[in-house]
Image (cartoon, grey):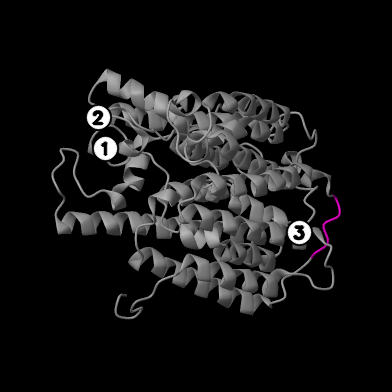
């Protein structure tokens, strides 16, 4: 790959300009300049300066920029259920041309994962734990080596895996060999590539199966690949993998058991999707609620069991369980990103408003369909960014696929749980037992 793409590098600033021109040329509706679609495209491109400002080292104002644009999209997503008229605005490219563009973008982005450099720490989430990993970043915050540093909420083994590409020493402080470094690099970058493939395939399948329009799914997936965020943070496993799992949970919404298993996996990996529960329970209220909740609980129990099997002591297990269910995120003492420059007390009213928002989504809108599930799920995962103490605002892959689908979705008022969700079936082992059971002799 190095020989084929000699000195290949995707410069962030250059890609911002190139991708912006491509987005305008492919998606902008010149005959309907004042359409909501055009406003969404302009707002998506407005994220780019904030990412560049953060990459240049001016984190505070970069996060302020991201929060400003995120605030606009939060309002837009909350108002999306009120937009009943959804005219079909297809991209300016044909389906075949758009498919070719998406495949080409995917190829070059994956090449950037394979041969690119590790992103600057300003564009990386800090999920370091105690030990040598913490010493590298703790000095920037005045923390003594060995003290607990930032702990990103969620499944700790997953976050440790996501950081393997950046580590150069083992847990005992010994430097890693070249073979070990190469193996870690291959494993983590393969996971990132598979994550992006899962996101793209999931978006296309949602368009094909639930929007009844493959062209729309390809358009949404290509726009996801065009965004500068995707190019700058392509390799971040803890960004893309949870986003991919959430996309596939939406793709499986007609089968509550599969949707619940994937939902539980995403919630266990990064904790924050648990705040989607009121919304999703409101959607499945009339059909599939018990199956969805039971499968979600089963997946969370499996992850907790995995923590117990990998922990060396009861105290370590308790600490990992608290991290998995967000205790470190709710009451963390340290922060990185926007909240590194502001008092943590200011997060309390934001968290309170967020909880009120999540609770209200169980009741509003009263008639939920796939469209409201998409837009309001994106709104919740976007609202998480405003109070998360760990570089909130940068984890855009958690809501971007939902946002892409919301921008391109048609009217989905008929995709409600009563008509779209499949009826419950007797589990396979019970069906076999019933089939093998001796039948009573007929009377007479």
Mark drawn on residue 39 = 3
Residue 403 at what x, y percent from top left? 65, 52
Q: Measure the alpha-carbon separation of dots 2 and 3.
A: 48 Å
Toward which corner of the image does residue 22 lie, by quadrant? bottom right
Residue 444 in view of the camera: no
Disc nearer the start of the sequence (2/1): 1
Question: Do residues under tags 2 and 1 come within 8 Å of each other at their CB atoms?
Answer: yes
Res. 135 mark: 1
Residue 87 in the magenta stretch? The answer is: yes
* Above/below status of 218 relative to 125: below
Secondary structure of residue under mark 3: helix
SS for callout 1: helix
For residue 303, what is the image quadrant? top left
Mark 3 and mark 1: span between their CA atoms?
44 Å
* Image-based side of 295 in relation to 169, left or right: right
Whether 229 is among the magenta residues is no
**Nearer to me, 236 or 50:** 50
**Of 54 and 110, which appears nearest the observer?**
54
Q: Which residues are magenta?
A: 84-88
Q: Residue at x 49, y 33 (%)?
A: 271
**Could you tell me if the residues under marks 2 and 3 are in contact, i.e. CB atoms within 8 Å?**
no
Where residue 146 is drawn, which disc sits there?
2
Between circles 3 and 1, the one closer to the viewer is: 1
Image quadrant assignment for residue 353: top right
Q: Is residue 271 left or right of residue 368?
A: left
Q: Nearer the viewer, residue 269 or 434?
A: 269
* Residue located 80% across and 73% down the image: 30
**Where residue 439 appears, x then y in whole percent?**
54, 30
């Amino acid at each position: 790959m190095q020989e084929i793409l000699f000195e290949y590098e995707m410069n962030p600033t250059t890609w911002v300009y190139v991708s912006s021109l491509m987005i305008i040329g492919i998606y902008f509706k010149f005959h309907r300049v004042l359409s909501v679609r055009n406003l969404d495209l302009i707002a998506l491109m407005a994220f780019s300066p904030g990412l560049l400002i953060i990459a240049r080292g001016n984190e505070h104002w970069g996060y302020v920029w991201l929060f400003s644009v995120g605030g606009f999209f939060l309002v837009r997503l909350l108002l999306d259920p009120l937009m009943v008229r959804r005219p079909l605005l297809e991209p300016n490219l044909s389906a075949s041309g758009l498919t070719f563009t998406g495949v080409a973008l995917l190829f070059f982005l994956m090449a950037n994962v394979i041969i690119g450099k590790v992103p600057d720490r300003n564009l990386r989430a800090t999920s370091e734990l105690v030990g040598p990993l913490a010493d590298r970043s703790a000095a920037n915050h005045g923390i003594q080596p060995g003290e607990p540093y930032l702990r990103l909420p969620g499944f700790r083994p997953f976050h440790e895996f996501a950081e393997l590409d950046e580590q150069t020493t083992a847990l005992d402080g010994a430097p890693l060999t070249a073979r070990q470094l190469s193996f870690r690099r291959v494993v983590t970058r393969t996971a990132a590539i598979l994550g992006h493939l899962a996101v793209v395939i999931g978006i296309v399948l949602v368009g094909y199966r639930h929007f009844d329009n493959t062209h729309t799914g390809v358009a949404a997936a290509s726009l996801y690949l065009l965004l500068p965020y995707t190019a700058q943070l392509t390799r971040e496993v803890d960004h893309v993998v949870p986003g991919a799992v959430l996309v596939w949970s939406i793709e499986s919404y007609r089968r509550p058991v599969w949707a619940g298993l994937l939902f539980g996996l995403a919630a266990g990996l990064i904790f924050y999707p648990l705040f989607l529960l009121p919304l999703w329970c409101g959607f499945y209220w009339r059909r599939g609620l018990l199956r969805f909740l039971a499968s979600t609980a089963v997946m969370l129990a499996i992850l907790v069991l995995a923590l117990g099997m990998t922990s060396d002591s009861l105290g370590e297990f308790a600490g990992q369980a608290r991290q998995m269910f967000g205790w470190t995120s709710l009451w963390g003492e340290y922060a990185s990103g926007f909240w590194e420059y502001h008092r943590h007390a200011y997060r309390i009213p934001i968290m309170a408003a967020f909880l009120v928002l999540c609770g209200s989504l169980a009741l509003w809108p009263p008639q939920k369909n796939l469209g409201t599930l998409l837009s309001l799920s994106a709104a919740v995962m976007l609202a998480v960014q405003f109070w998360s103490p760990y570089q909130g605002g940068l984890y855009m892959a958690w809501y971007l696929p939902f946002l892409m689908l919301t921008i391109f979705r048609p009217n989905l008022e008929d995709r409600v749980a009563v008509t779209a969700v499949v009826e419950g079936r007797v589990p396979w082992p019970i069906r076999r037992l019933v089939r093998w059971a001796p039948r009573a002799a007929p009377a007479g």
